[in-house]
Amino acid sequence: MKTAAATAPGAGPAAAGRRRAVLLRRICIGIMLLATLEFVVATTGVQILNLPRSTDFATYYLAGAQALDGLSPYDTAAIAERGYAMGFEHEQFPFLYPPAFALAMQPLSRFSYPRARQIWMLVATWALLAALVCTVQLLRHQAKLLGLQEPTRTWIVLAAFFPAALNSTSVHNDIRAGSVGILLYLALLLVAAGLVVRSRWLTGTALALATLLKLTPVLLILYAAWRRNRAGAGIAIALLMCTVVGAWLHWGWQIMPEYARALLDAVGREYPRPMNQSLDAALSRLLLPSAQVAAPFDLPRIKQVLAFLLTGVIVAATLYSLRPRRRHPGLLPVELGYVVLALLLIMKITWLHTLTAMLFVWPFLMLPILRAAERGARWALPAGLWACFGFLLSSAHIPVLWQGLRAGAASLFISVHVVGLLILWFVARTVLQREEDIC
């Protein structure tokens, strides 16, 4: 005998709709798991057995060895000498990270280089998996905050994001270089989560971690304070000061001036290499001939003026968009991503693997756009298409290292990832300006 609920009008279609939703969610989760398995086996599994050439991690390892011996990690000649003694055929990049980073590398420097490299690769892989789990949790929370009517759309976004992120050029380059992009991705996700749930300890700890991995995120401490998480900003500053004291105790007071000199020396140079995807590097490849790229024009003064003006425009526009003292919590990950994109654009050096840090931008950008579409906003469809196109350009495996692109007008193609960053920055700005259509 059928119950009244079973025979009620619409009960059948509603149940069928729920079954379709469950099936779609399972399919999406299956895609996510398969993409993760493929990455662990085909990327980490292969690279860990056939270690890539020595790049960023070699510098970290040698800086840790310097710290272990009580020597400065900012002594470029000493690091090069250590590298040659270990059999490296080329000088390593200068160490441009905070002193505490070198202190943290001391345990790894006690291992042989190949073993330390393998451990670092495993750490990066686990950090990436943790970041993906955090992305799932925070994205679902964002969907609830925004009131997204179709929860299955969250899973569709995740099913598209996992394969794209795990196979992105930034992630693959980060794994091969042994850099910190993946760790930054995780740290910035935790900052976003801390801002959304208003956790001062999570925000502060994540901000301190991000700043120790790369100095530029120190500016995000000011952003956190502006977004009414002053306690988190204070915790970040306190933790960073503790690391400074630790560096003083280990090396003496002179270590901080040495670090400052290393940064100033780096800022004063040009970095037109194809791997550098900052706005400054794109202008250098266009207007400043070098040994790396034969630019189509030789206009160094114009390059400097344009770099100054465009940086000023990005900074001014970004600050202008941050004017509202209150922001819907569902849009805070978008706003954080907007600021991170601006920082990546205006930095002197934004290596291709550093773009891993902004992977979280696209999924958190898509949900507000989908919510705006549910509410009938006409701008949502083009914004969504542009967001997907920007993510493609910023993350796809585009052959920017081809030798044929290093001369004349073809060199413009090298900066395609910069174009992707600019597009995502513009779309994020649009979303933030249309908050009333979303929330």
Image: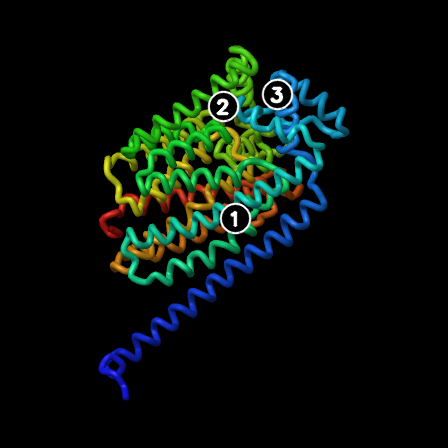
For the residues labelled 1 and 3, the Cα–Cα distance comes to: 30 Å
Q: Which label was assigned to residue 129? A: 1
Give percent across and percent down for residue 136: 42, 52
Could you classify mark 3 by the number of other residues whose Cα lies within 10 Å: few (under 14), some (14-19), or many (20 or more)?
A: many
Kindly identify the residue that appears in the image at 36 percent across and 43 percent down: 333
Secondary structure, mark 1, is: helix
Looking at the rendered structure, the kind of residue marked 3 is: Ala
Say the numbered circle drawn on residue 67. 3
Question: Residue at coordinates 62% horizontally, 25% vertically from top-left?
Answer: 64
Q: Position of residue 137 (x, y in %)?
A: 40, 51
Disc nearer the start of the sequence (1/3) = 3
Residue in view at x 26 percent, y 52 percent: 438
Image coords of residue 72 (percent x, y): 61, 17
Is residue 151 visible in the rendered image? The answer is: yes
Check disc 2 and give the amino acid type: Arg
Classify mark 3: helix, strand or loop.
Answer: helix
| Lower position in the chain sequence, tag 2 or tag 1 | 1
Q: Which residue is mark 2?
A: 301
The mark found on residue 77 in the picture is: none
- Sequence-wise first label, 3 or 2: 3
The residue lying at 37 percent from left, 27 percent from top is 235
Question: In front of the other: label 3 or label 2?
Answer: 3
Left or right? Give the position of 14 relative to 245.
Answer: left
Label 2: state its secondary structure: helix
- Within 10 Å of disc 1 (Cα), the crowding (few <14, some 14-19, many 20+) is some
Q: Report the front residue among 228 and 198.
A: 198
Point out the residue furthest to the bottom here: 1
- Which quarter of the image is occupied by the N terminus? bottom left
